[in-house]
Amino acid sequence: MALISLKSFHFYSPGAPASRRILMTLSKSLSSVSERRKPQSYSPAAVRVLCSKDKCRDVFCRKNHVQLRMQSLSVIETMHLYGDTGSSAKAHERWMDEQVFFRTLKSLCTSQEIFKFLRSLEVMSDIMASGALQRISEVEVDDDGLKNPEDVLENEVFRALCFQLEFESSKLSNTGLLNALQALIKLRVDPQSTLIASLLSESEERLANRKLTVDSLCSLGESLLELEGPSCAMLEQIVSHMQEKDIENWSPREMAMVYKILQVAVGEREQYRDLLNRMNSATLTIAYQLSPKFTSVILNSLVALHQTHVVPLILALCKHSVKHVPYFTDDELVSVLEAFLFFGHREQIFTEALEKHVPESIPTMHPETVSKVMQYCCQKKILSKPILDAVAESFISNADSFTTDQIAEYIVPFGTLNYLPPNASSLFRKLEAILHTRFSQFQPHALLNLLHSCVLIQRYPVNFLPKVFSPYFLQQLQAQPPGLDRVVASQLTQLFLTVTLECPFYEGPKLLPKYQVNAFLTTQSFLDVHLFKKVKSGLLYLLKKRIYFSSEVSTPYFYTVDIEIKLDEEGFMLPTTQCEEVHTR
């Protein structure tokens, strides 16, 4: 570990009280840089290093291109790192100081509070300094980036820390180096800056010299994924080093991180198959220890790496995920649901956990997450009234802000599951209003799926059929994958015939015969396949012979009947092949 001395940032002022010297000299350092500044405008492609007479360096915020200018110090003024020297008693005292430092740091909620706290310190370890940067990233960075770029990047304490990290990177501990790199990446410091380049160069050198532990390798891998993406060459080097480590001793965080690197960087290459198999076996023994985040990450990686053969691990993770349902973030819940769908797994207690969590959380859930929940219920044929009722309520209140794909994803499961919520009239009034104003914004296949689902629950979109049956819309359907295949043609035919039968007053355009099918596909029966089998088995037991009932019978009206039994005038059963003396079907 190394120690950072804020005192060594000072322009020494003889006679100034020690307690005031830090603030005075930091202020003086800042003002001396400001005096040399000239008003300039920088484009995103601006030069990062100014002319030498300026003696300043620029670091740009990656998103907002906020300029951070740091004065280059002379040799005398350069900041110093102090190694771990002294007795074990002093080391213990310093460790206790770190504990107090991090407890205090955790209680601070703004960057200005953190900077004020740091100004009160004369010396801190590099781990404390990198921890402070990490805490700043936690409180100042959200989904849209750095909230107050100038307040952070222009702060003299932040600049001082960055300056010392850059020029003394070789003296940092592994933890200090890699934590600082992670924090600066999250703070959107320009990846082309000399600061990031210096930290990366030092990290690469330690990687090449095999000086990094498993934990450090994972931290570096996480930073590289964020900074350079899956194409980074160093990621494969990290995985190669990980192969040499003892997998059985990896922590859940380390296991999850290596899965993620394998997923995005190296995939299912033959040379890493043994590593992946060993990881799968080791993960099975620690599945019960995984946090919501790591459970989600590993399930997501297993999907991407097509690990369908590791059934015991998949079952263990799916069962373990049940207790995490209330604690998953939106993205984590989406990953878990995708894994359930990909592996074809269905867990009743998981469904019960969703039914308890989703209805009360929908007001704060992202629409994409709700869409994925609906997709899960739809594909798994889970008719969950608590979830569907809550989704319907949310749709009525918030649908104006949804994308067209989200609108379709919210509504289609109602038709597939054949369920009308208690507020169905309000739900479909809202849907009709949206279709009137945003009809042209829908993708053709999404719109067809939406309207087709409506007729399945006796809601007939008569006002929109002239547009759907128009040559222009049909050409759009044909132009986009999957085109006008048999499934799409079946949807169009059912939409047309249903409205023709149920809405005799409809006098708009008809669906041309060339777009119609003569029989509908029955691969997705509206009756649950297991229930259907039970009904047929029960009838066979009751009627003794199979000749007395038929299944999946087409009618002259283009409907498909699940079960048909023929009776004569006295109510006796007739063989299904008999056409005479049939009184009732």
Image (cartoon, rainbow, N blue to C red):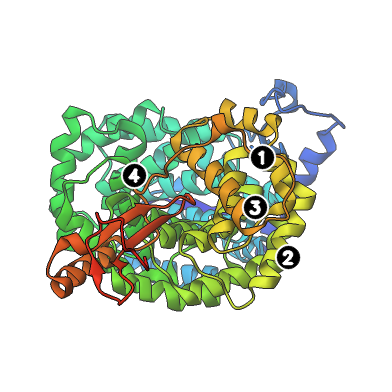
What residue did someone put label 1 on?
510
Residue at x 68%, y 52% (from the top left corner): 152
Which residue is tagged 3? 157
Disc 3 residue type (three-letter): Val
| Crowd class of label 1 (few under 14; some 14 to 19; many from 20; radius 10 Å) | some
User: Which amino acid, by three-letter code, is at mark 1?
Assistant: Lys
For the residue pair 8 and 558, the one nearer the viewer reads as 558
Mark 2: give few (<14), some (14-19) or many (20+) Cα within 10 Å.
few
Could you tell me if the residues under marks 2 and 3 are in contact, i.e. CB atoms within 8 Å? no
Badges 2 and 1: C-beta atoms under 8 Å apart?
no
Pick whichever of labels 4 and 3 is earlier in the sequence: 3
**Mark 2 or 3: the one toward you:** 2
Label 2 belongs to which residue? Answer: 429
Q: Nearer the viewer, mark 4 or mark 3?
A: 4
Q: Quadrant of residue 147?
A: bottom right
Q: Which mark is first along the chain, 2 or 4?
A: 4
Q: Position of residue 19 (x, y in %)?
A: 66, 66
- Amino acid carrying label 4: it is Lys
Which x, y percent locates residue 472? 70, 30
Which residue is disc 4 drawn over? 260
In this view, the residue in front, 116 or 85, is: 116
Neighbor class of circle 4 (other Cα within 10 Å; few <14, some 14-19, many 20+) is many
User: Where residue 1 sits: x, y (%)?
Assistant: 36, 52
CB within 8 Å, label 1 to label 3: no
Residue lying furthest right = 39
Spatial separation of the CA atoms under disc 4 and disc 2: 45 Å
Q: Earlier in the sequence, mark 2 or mark 1?
A: 2
The amino acid beneath tag 2 is Arg
> What residue lies at 78% left-to-right and 51% top-to-bottom?
436
Image side of residue 117 versus residue 34, left or right: left
